[in-house]
Image (cartoon, rainbow, N blue to C red):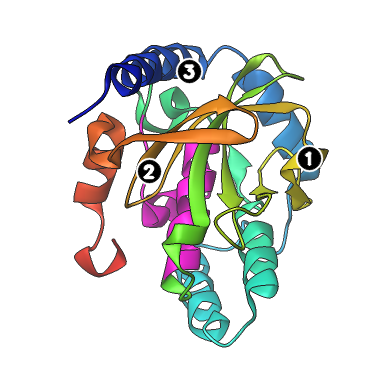
């Protein structure tokens, strides 16, 4: 049973998520300009089947890598894709793509980058308890954004995997990002402060997450 305080935080979560989802398209040209000027060229120019095979190879070879190298390879691989809005790709305001959809189109928005990195690291054998897809506010762009956070231990400072900044940096070096809420396949957290989160529920409460997971291959979930 939720306490009164937890109920207030749950309400705050839905308010925050509504604000974020409502603002994700407000500065998309800035995101697209950044990505077009800094994208990798090694894989995105290939056809969809070649990209999918390279992705499978990265997953297979990544089973034996240490976690730092897994993070590096996955972050670099997906940051080679283009940033395009959901309107441009799918004709809707908000669509969370599966990793396969993202790779086939070689494009997506910040949610798609983060989701693809999350499930790829999971497929490489990383414990998902160490990973959280995190909604933040980009203070530089003054808009909502999504990144993937990696926690080496539950109390560790997270490392941030981001399509805006290719370098994997600790959260303390990303003062341009203010966390709002985060989730993985097990739980949902609301950020009370930059360093404090409260568990508020399950990712199944997020409609776009439910829809995306339902489209995925069962073995990849």
Q: Is 174 on the left or on the right of 73, as rendered?
A: right
Residue pointed to by mark 1 = 172
- Which is the main secondary structure of the residues drawn in magenta? helix
User: Which region shows up in magenta?
Assistant: 95-122
Residue 9 is situated, as x and y percent measured from the top left of the image, at 38, 19
Closest to the observer, 73 or 132: 132
In the depicted structure, whether residue 61 falls above or below residue 129: below
Residue pointed to by mark 2 = 97
Classify mark 3: helix, strand or loop.
helix
Classify mark 2: helix, strand or loop.
loop
Q: Is 164 on the left or on the right of 106, as rendered?
A: right
Task: Please report the residue visible at 76 percent of the width from the left and 27 percent of the height from the top.
Answer: 176
Classify mark 1: helix, strand or loop.
helix
Mark 1 or 2, closer to the camera: 1
Q: Neighbour class for label 2 at 10 Å: few (<14), some, many (≥20)?
A: many
In the depicted structure, whether residue 27 falls above or below residue 192: above
Q: Which mark is residue 20?
A: 3
Q: Neighbour class for label 1 at 10 Å: few (<14), some, many (≥20)?
A: some
Q: CA distance from mark 3 to mark 1?
A: 22 Å
Q: CA distance from mark 1 to mark 2?
A: 29 Å
Of mark 3 and mark 1, the one earlier in the sequence is: 3
Mark 2 or 3, closer to the camera: 3
Q: CA distance from mark 2 to mark 3?
A: 17 Å
Q: Which mark is residue 156?
A: none
Could you tell me if the residues under marks 2 and 3 are in contact, i.e. CB atoms within 8 Å?
no
Q: Is residue 109 visible?
A: no
């Amino acid at each position: 049973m939720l306490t009164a305080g937890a109920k207030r935080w749950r309400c705050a979560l839905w308010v925050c998520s509504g604000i974020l989802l409502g603002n994700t398209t407000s500065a998309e040209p800035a995101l697209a300009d950044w990505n077009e000027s800094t994208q990798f060229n090694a894989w995105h120019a290939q056809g969809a089947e070649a990209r999918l095979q390279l992705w499978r190879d990265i997953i297979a070879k990544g089973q034996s890598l240490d976690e730092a190298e897994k993070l590096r390879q996955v972050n670099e691989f997906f940051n080679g894709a283009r940033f395009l809005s959901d309107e441009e790709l799918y004709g809707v305001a908000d669509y969370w793509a599966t990793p396969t959809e993202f790779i086939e189109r070689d494009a997506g928005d910040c949610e798609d980058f983060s989701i693809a990195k999350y499930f790829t690291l999971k497929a490489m054998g990383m414990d998902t308890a160490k990973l959280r897809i995190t909604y933040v506010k980009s203070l530089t762009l003054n808009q909502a954004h999504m990144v993937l956070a990696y926690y080496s231990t539950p109390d560790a400072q997270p490392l941030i995997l981001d399509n805006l900044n290719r370098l994997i940096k600790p959260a303390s070096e990303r003062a341009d990002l203010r966390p709002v809420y985060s989730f993985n396949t097990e739980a949902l957290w609301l950020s009370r402060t930059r360093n404090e989160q409260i568990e508020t529920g399950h990712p199944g409460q997020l409609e776009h997450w439910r829809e995306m997971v339902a489209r995925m291959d069962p073995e990849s979930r």
